[in-house]
C-alpha cells in the first residue's frame, strides 16, 4: 500500500506541475463561467471552446439534447479552466482540455455515457471510460443513435 501511495503522490505532483505550468502562461488557458453550446462545446468570455478528443451527437440527432443537458448540470455555476491546444479546429474553434477543479470534463462526459472517445483526435485517451460506459449501457449507449456517429467512437 505504501508503494501505491508514493506512486499516487508522484502522479499528483507531476499533474499539479503540468497544470501550474500551463496556468502560468495566460495565452494557453481560458478560465471562467461557461455557457453551453452542446455536449462538447462551451463558450467562456466569448471564446468558443471545443472539448479535445471527445464527440457528442450532432444537433437534431438522438442523444444531442441529453448530452447537452448533462454537461449543463455538471458545469452548473462552476468556474471552468481550459488548457488550449496550439491549433484551432477546422471550424475556427479553440480546442482544449477543460476542468472543473481537477476533474477532466471530457473524461467525466465519456465515463458517464454522455460523449464518446473520438479516436481520430484522442488516440484512445478515453478508451477505458468509454468501455465502462458501453458495458454499463450508460447514457447514449442505451439509445438508438446513428451508426455513422458510432464509427467515430473508437
Image (spheres, grey):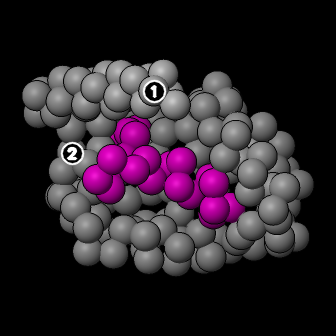
Question: Can you give x and y, in whole percent of width and height, for residue 28 in the image?
Answer: 21, 31
Residue 8 spot, x, y in % from top left = 42, 30
As displayed, is residue 48 above or below residue 143?
A: above
Q: Is residue 56 visible?
A: no
Q: Nearer the viewer, residue 146 or 109?
A: 109
Instruction: Answer whether labels 2 and 1 touch (C-beta < 8 Å).
Output: no
x%, y% of residue 6? 40, 23
Q: Is residue 35 visible?
A: yes
Residue located at (56% from left, 57% from top)? 109
Relative vertical location of residue 110 with respect to residue 5 in this rendering, above or below: below
Q: Is residue 114 left or right of residue 153?
A: left
Looking at the image, residue 141 sits to the left or right of residue 100; the answer is: right
- Rendering quarter of residue 74: bottom left
**Residue 125, image x, y percentages:** 60, 32
* SS assignment at label 2: strand
Label 1: which residue?
2
Amino acid at each position: 500500500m505504501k508503494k501505491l501511495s508514493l506512486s499516487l503522490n508522484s502522479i499528483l505532483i507531476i499533474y499539479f506541475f503540468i497544470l501550474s505550468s500551463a496556468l502560468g502562461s495566460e495565452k494557453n488557458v481560458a478560465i471562467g463561467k461557461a455557457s453551453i453550446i452542446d455536449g462538447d462545446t462551451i463558450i467562456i468570455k466569448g471564446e468558443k471552446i471545443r472539448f479535445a478528443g471527445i464527440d457528442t451527437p450532432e444537433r437534431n440527432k438522438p442523444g444531442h439534447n441529453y448530452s447537452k443537458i448533462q454537461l449543463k448540470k455538471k458545469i452548473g455555476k462552476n468556474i471552468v479552466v481550459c488548457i488550449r491546444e496550439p491549433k484551432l479546429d477546422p471550424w475556427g474553434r479553440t480546442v482544449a482540455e477543460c476542468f472543473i477543479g481537477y476533474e477532466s470534463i471530457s473524461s467525466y462526459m465519456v465515463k458517464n455515457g454522455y460523449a464518446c472517445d473520438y479516436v481520430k483526435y484522442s488516440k484512445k485517451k478515453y478508451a477505458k471510460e468509454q468501455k465502462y460506459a458501453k458495458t454499463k449501457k450508460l447514457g447514449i449507449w442505451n439509445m438508438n443513435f446513428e451508426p455513422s456517429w458510432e464509427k467515430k467512437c473508437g
